[in-house]
Image: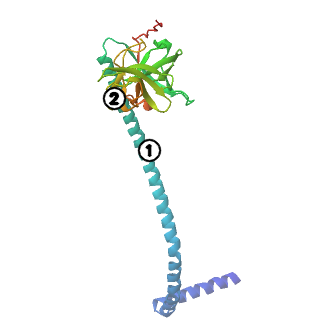
């Protein structure tokens, strides 16, 4: 019974509200409500703006981070491709230079080898190549650069790789000649100091810029292999010999490929 009374009362209030609303009697109340609620709503809106801005910035930041990540991946991929193409171009040019050396010496036989290591002790000037006795490499064979200049001599051979002692090694000695004046001497290595040409007669006309090549004397090297260029000449008038500093023609610190002169066999001459 009580429920029925409540339902009837609610229905009558609702009906009354509808009639009053249609007649405009509730307009003042509605206006009052809007007047009171509008500042509150405006204040709440202004208070929520920083939160909304923060959320927008977070979303924008995430979008930028994702875009930057994708761009970094693209840059990395392009850089790797450029490096690959440069390496291929460099190797093609280097092998082409080696082929020109072979063409310039049609009577000789060469073996192209790749430099795979350097002596780790810093007590020797030596590099390892990826060719060994299985490829026909033997001790004493002369090794040349891509430009055809002297690099060194094969000093130790294993089945699939070999060690090459560079001309700059302290134990390296090469009978040489200054081509412009036909002056003979001995080019020796000096650890970390390049090359020097000793036993140059005091009266010899040797100047900076002169070309130094193998003389062929002694039988350990073929003649006329380019060694380098004279940088400076030292010696006092009272000295019997002068000494010249020689810059190697080959970039010995940046060797990547070399030519092993397999057709040349060094001659071990006995003392007279």
Q: What is the x, y in percent for residue 14?
A: 56, 85
- Return the mark for residue 76: 1
Q: What element carries label 2?
A: helix
Q: Going from the N terminus, do you reach mark 1 or mark 2 first?
A: 1
| Quarter holding residue 141 | top left
**Does 6 sit above or below residue 193?**
below
Q: What is the x, y in percent for residue 249?
A: 37, 28
**Does 76 sit above or below residue 155?**
below
Residue at which label 2 appears: 93
Side of 179 relative to 171 (left or right): left
- Of 61 and 143, nearer the camera is 143
Measured in 3D between alpha carbons, the distance from the residue under mark 1 to the one under mark 2, in whole angstroms, is 26 Å
Identity of the residue drawn at 45% across and 58% down = 64
| Quarter holding residue 254 | top left
Confirm whether residue 1 shows in the render.
Answer: no
Q: What is the x, y in percent for residue 179?
A: 31, 22
Side of 192 relative to 10 (left or right): left
Quarter holding the N terminus is bottom right
Q: Is mark 1 on a helix, strand or loop?
A: helix
């Amino acid at each position: 019974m009580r429920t029925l009374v409540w339902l009837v009362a609610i229905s009558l209030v609702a009906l009354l509200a509808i009639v009053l609303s249609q007649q405009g009697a509730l307009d003042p109340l509605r206006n009052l409500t809007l007047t009171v609620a509008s500042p509150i709503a405006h204040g709440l809106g202004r208070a929520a703006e920083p939160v909304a801005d923060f959320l927008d910035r977070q979303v924008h930041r995430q979008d930028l981070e994702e875009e930057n990540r994708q761009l970094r991946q693209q840059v990395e991929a392009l850089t790797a491709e450029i490096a690959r193409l440069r390496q291929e171009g460099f190797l093609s040019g280097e092998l082409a230079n080696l082929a020109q050396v072979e063409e310039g010496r049609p009577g000789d036989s060469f073996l192209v080898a790749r430099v795979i290591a350097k002596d780790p002790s810093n007590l020797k000037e030596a590099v390892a190549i990826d060719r060994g006795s299985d490829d026909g490499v033997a001790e004493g064979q002369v090794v040349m650069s891509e430009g055809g200049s002297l690099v060194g001599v094969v000093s130790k051979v294993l089945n699939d790789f070999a060690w090459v002692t560079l001309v700059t090694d302290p134990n390296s000695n090469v009978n040489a000649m200054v081509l412009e004046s036909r002056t003979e001497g001995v080019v020796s290595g000096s650890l970390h100091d390049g090359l020097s040409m000793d036993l140059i007669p005091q009266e010899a006309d040797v100047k900076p810029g002169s070309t130094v090549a193998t003389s062929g004397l002694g039988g350990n090297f073929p003649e006329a292999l380019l060694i380098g260029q004279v940088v400076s000449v030292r010696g006092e008038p009272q000295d019997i010999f002068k000494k010249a500093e020689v810059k190697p023609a080959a970039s010995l610190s940046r060797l990547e490929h070399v030519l092993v002169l397999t057709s040349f066999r060094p001659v071990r001459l006995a003392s007279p």
